[in-house]
Image (cartoon, rainbow, N blue to C red):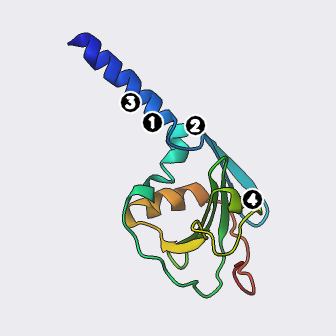
């Protein structure tokens, strides 16, 4: 029985490590902060497996740019409670319009609002753009 538990624990640990990126950068108007470690970084993305509704682009507002190595980018707009998600190769300038992985807007899940707010505490947001990137 102990062997089964040990093997299961090792399998779960390696599976968790493979789930997501291990480095993120959150940038505001004048500076950036880095987050390292797969558990810390993946906690920013655990909403991926939960249902959500795609939202319309909000009116421009101050925002933070979040880049997750080997995953994609997020525009975090705390004033609107929304995030713009670019996942995959298109997040790095290779997006083909009409692809199935088009960028989209979604609400920041309520259970993660405090986490995201804590991350950007003390970091001035980027100013609101004239319009959001397409």
Residue ID for mark 2: 37
Query: In terms of depth relative to the viewer, which is nearer, 127 or 6?
Result: 6
- Indicate whether 20 appears above or below 102: above
Tell me the residue at 47%/77% (across/down). 54
Give the structural element (helix, strand or loop) at label 3.
helix
Query: Rounded to the nearest whole Å, what is the CA distance between mark 2 and mark 3?
Result: 17 Å
Query: Of the residues tagged 2 and 1, which is closer to the observer?
Result: 1
* Mark 3 residue crowding within 10 angstroms, few (<14) / some (14–19) / many (20+): few
Residue 122 has which mark? Answer: none
User: Decide: marks 1, 3 in contact (CB < 8 A)?
Assistant: yes
Q: Earlier in the sequence, mark 4 or mark 3?
A: 3
Residue ID for mark 4: 92
Query: Rounded to the nearest whole Å, what is the CA distance between mark 4 and mark 2?
Result: 22 Å
Query: In terms of depth relative to the viewer, which is nearer, 107 or 112?
Result: 107
Give the structural element (helix, strand or loop) at label 2.
loop
Query: Of the residues tagged 4 and 2, which is closer to the observer?
Result: 4
Residue 12 has which mark? Answer: 3
């Amino acid at each position: 029985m102990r062997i089964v538990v040990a093997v299961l624990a090792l399998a779960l640990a390696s599976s968790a490590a493979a789930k997501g990126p291990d480095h993120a950068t959150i940038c505001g108007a004048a500076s950036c902060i880095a987050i390292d470690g797969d558990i810390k970084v993946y906690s920013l993305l655990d909403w991926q497996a939960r249902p959500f509704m795609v939202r319309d682009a909000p009116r421009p507002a101050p925002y933070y740019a979040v880049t997750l190595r080997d995953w994609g980018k997020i525009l975090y707009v705390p004033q609107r409670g929304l995030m713009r998600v670019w996942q995959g190769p298109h997040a790095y300038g290779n997006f083909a319009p009409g692809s199935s992985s088009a960028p989209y807007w979604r609400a920041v899940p309520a259970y993660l609002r405090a986490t995201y707010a804590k991350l950007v505490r003390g970091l001035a947001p980027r100013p609101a753009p004239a319009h959001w990137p397409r």
